[in-house]
Amino acid sequence: MLLGAGKASDMFWLADSRKVQVPILTLKPAGGSAISMEGCEERHLGMIANLAAEPGGMTEETVDLNSRCSSITIERLVGERGKEIIDCNEIHVVVQEWVAVGEPRKHPITGVLQFTGGANFFGAIGDSGKLQGVGFGQKPVNGVAVSGPRFTSRKPLNTRSLVVGTTKLLKDAVSSRLIHELPKLPGGLPKFTVKTTIEVALEGGGKKHFEKEVAIDLREN
């Protein structure tokens, strides 16, 4: 498990690791992305969010899956007027829920998408449902993804797949707020519960809430 206490203003990097859990990662803002990964396997991410620092503000990416990752699952991705909610290159990932706070700069995937192949994919499709552009990183060579790598020493996969379940597009979002409920550390160790709520204020005074709670026991192996 990746466990960080305090505040962070830039992304986390994970490389060449297996079975690492990241139950909650919410940054406001996160610089380039909330988390970037290379060469990772069998990883489960919970609620991952990159939110704007100011009302009406924008973000870059929520998650950057750069190269050579497989068997990645993500419960919920949240981006606020993001350039990309997900940068999906030479990886295999399932995203259960996708939330766009405000109008994204690249239209998010709607409905259920299952896309496989060798070209890079940057998490945006047009209204016709067709992929736009070749994504970031290098262009495919003979249909094979060649994006990156920067840090990993793992062998190329030469394939990638992205499966997205449900999507929520909150075009009328005005601002966002993070609400954290956690014990005072280190007094709460080794067993404690953390709860994070993303509160999105909407035009007209309404609100949407997205929550994630996790019990952590550092005595477990």
Image (cartoon, grey):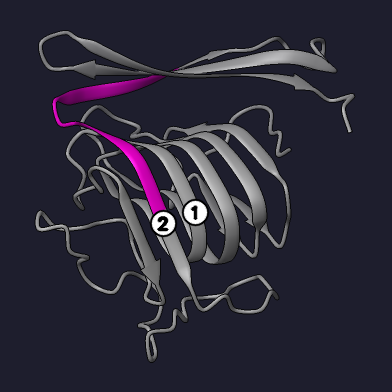
Where is residue 75 shown, x and y percent of the image?
49, 35
Q: Which residue is depicted at the point 69% across and 9% down?
A: 183
Question: Along the horizontal axis of the image, is 112 left or right of 56?
Answer: right
**Is 173 covered by the magenta stretch?**
yes
Identity, as a three-letter code, of the amino acid under mark 2 = Leu
Q: Quadrant of residue 208?
A: top left
Q: Which residue is depicted at the point 35% across and 83% down?
A: 139
Please report contact status of discs 2 and 1: CB closer than 8 Å, yes or no: yes
Q: Secondary structure at mark 1?
A: strand
Q: Which residue is depicted at the point 38% across and 91% down?
A: 142
In front here: 175 or 214?
A: 214
Q: Residues within 10 Å of mark 1 (few under 14, many from 20)?
A: many
Question: Along the horizontal axis of the image, is 39 left or right of 147?
Answer: right
Q: Which residue is depicted at the point 43% across and 83% down?
A: 144
> Which residue matches tag 2?
162
Q: Residues within 10 Å of mark 2 (few under 14, many from 20)?
A: some
Where is residue 8 shown, x and y percent of the image?
57, 36
Q: Is residue 151 above or below residue 155?
A: above
Residue furthest out toward the bottom:
142
Tell me the quadrant of the picture where the N terminus can be found: top right
Q: Secondary structure at mark 2?
A: strand
Q: Which mark is residue 93?
A: 1
Question: Along the horizontal axis of the image, is 49 left or right of 128?
Answer: right
**Is 31 covered by the magenta stretch?**
no
- The residues colored magenta run 163-178
Q: Is residue 165 above or below residue 176?
A: below
Where is residue 24 shown, x and y percent of the image?
57, 30
